[in-house]
């Protein structure tokens, strides 16, 4: 069975909040699913997660997967993660990072450092591009600062360039590579037009279509793959792995 999506990173996911994430990413799959299945859109903490005592789990758990870690809720995130890590669980923290959040997490989770890996999502090296697609998420400068904080604190750091919001992700890697101790995952923007329409951003569909069409070209994708061949820690998400495999068969 082909492994896709978050399963490529972790066998399980866990979330503290429900509803539409305040980052407001126009391509958000979780918000689109909330709309599709008529689920509550209000962003609020899950009552079932407050104060729960966790047991030891096998493997790595990704946190979060349907929302992000933002400054206004950092106390709740710290409490949740401490409770989750206490029995010896391992966690992959996936976030578009605010420096103040990462600084706090590094300080509070230091006793559990060997159980934690940060995977920072940076789809573009241009803050204006990030603001277009992720209007209330951190700028590129903020994310770069946060990554450096985690790296200098001795935590394992990895990078997610999914979805790719730039035509050339090389500039992101060039800038952030000194502070990445783990893998760099790169993937296309998936189901973008449907999700953006569901999330109420029809005015941005034409711009997004042009990006999706560019990424639909195998030659464009293989150009990225070849340009990054010198980095042995680059990993390709399923959307790009399919292109690589298809081109290998044609050789």
Image (cartoon, rainbow, N blue to C red):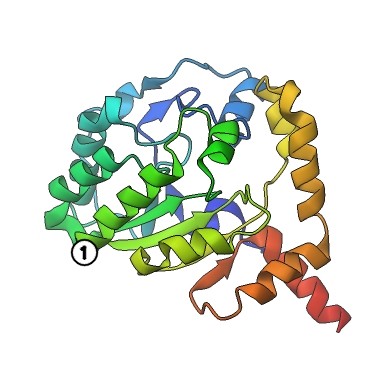
Q: Is residue 130 left or right of 168 when viewed as pictured?
A: left
Q: Quadrant of the C terminus?
A: bottom right
Check disc 1: other Cα within 10 Å, few if <14, some if 14-19, many if 20+: few
Q: Is residue 226 left or right of 44 when viewed as pictured?
A: right
Helix, strand or loop under label 1: loop
- In the rendered image, which quarter is residue 71 located in? top left
Residue 82 visible at all:
yes
Residue 63 visible at all:
no
Q: Is residue 100 left or right of 190 when viewed as pictured?
A: left
Question: What's the residue at 66%, 63% (across, down)?
Answer: 2
Against 128, residue 119 (above or below) is below
- In the rendered image, which quarter is residue 101 located in? top left
Can you give x and y, in whole percent of width and height, for residue 119 in the image? 40, 55
Against 130, residue 218 (above or below) is below
Against 121, residue 53 (above or below) is above
Question: What's the residue at 80%, 42% (across, down)?
Answer: 210
Can you give x and y, in whole percent of width and height, for residue 249 in the image? 84, 80
Residue furthest to the right in view is: 250
Against 49, residue 180 (above or below) is below
Q: Quadrant of the N terminus?
A: bottom right
Question: What's the residue at 76%, 54% (across, down)?
Answer: 215
Can you give x and y, in whole percent of width and height, for residue 96 in the image? 42, 43
Q: Which residue is mark 1?
A: 154
């Amino acid at each position: 069975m082909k492994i896709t999506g978050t399963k490529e990173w972790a066998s399980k996911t866990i979330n503290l909040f429900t509803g539409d994430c305040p980052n407001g990413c126009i391509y958000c799959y979780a918000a689109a699913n909330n709309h599709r299945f008529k689920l509550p859109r209000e962003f609020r903490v899950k009552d079932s997660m407050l104060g729960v005592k966790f047991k030891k789990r096998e493997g790595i758990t990704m946190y979060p997967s349907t929302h992000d870690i933002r400054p206004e809720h950092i106390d709740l995130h710290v409490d949740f993660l401490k409770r989750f890590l206490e029995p010896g669980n391992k966690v992959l923290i996936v976030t578009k990072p605010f420096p103040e959040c990462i600084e706090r997490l590094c300080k509070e989770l230091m006793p559990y450092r060997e159980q934690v890996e940060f995977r920072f999502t940076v789809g573009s090296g241009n803050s204006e591009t990030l603001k277009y697609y992720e209007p209330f998420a951190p700028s590129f400068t903020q994310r770069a600062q946060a990554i450096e904080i985690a790296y200098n604190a001795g935590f394992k750091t990895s990078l997610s360039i999914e979805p790719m919001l730039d035509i050339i992700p090389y500039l992101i890697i060039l800038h952030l590579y000194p502070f990445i101790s783990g893998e760099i995952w790169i993937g296309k923007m998936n189901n973008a037009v449907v999700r953006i329409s569901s999330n109420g951003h029809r005015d941005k569909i034409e711009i997004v279509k042009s990006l999706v069409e560019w990424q639909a070209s195998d030659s464009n994708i293989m150009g990225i793959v070849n340009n990054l061949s010198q980095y042995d820690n680059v990993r390709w998400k399923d959307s790009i792995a399919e292109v690589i495999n298809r081109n290998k068969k044609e050789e």
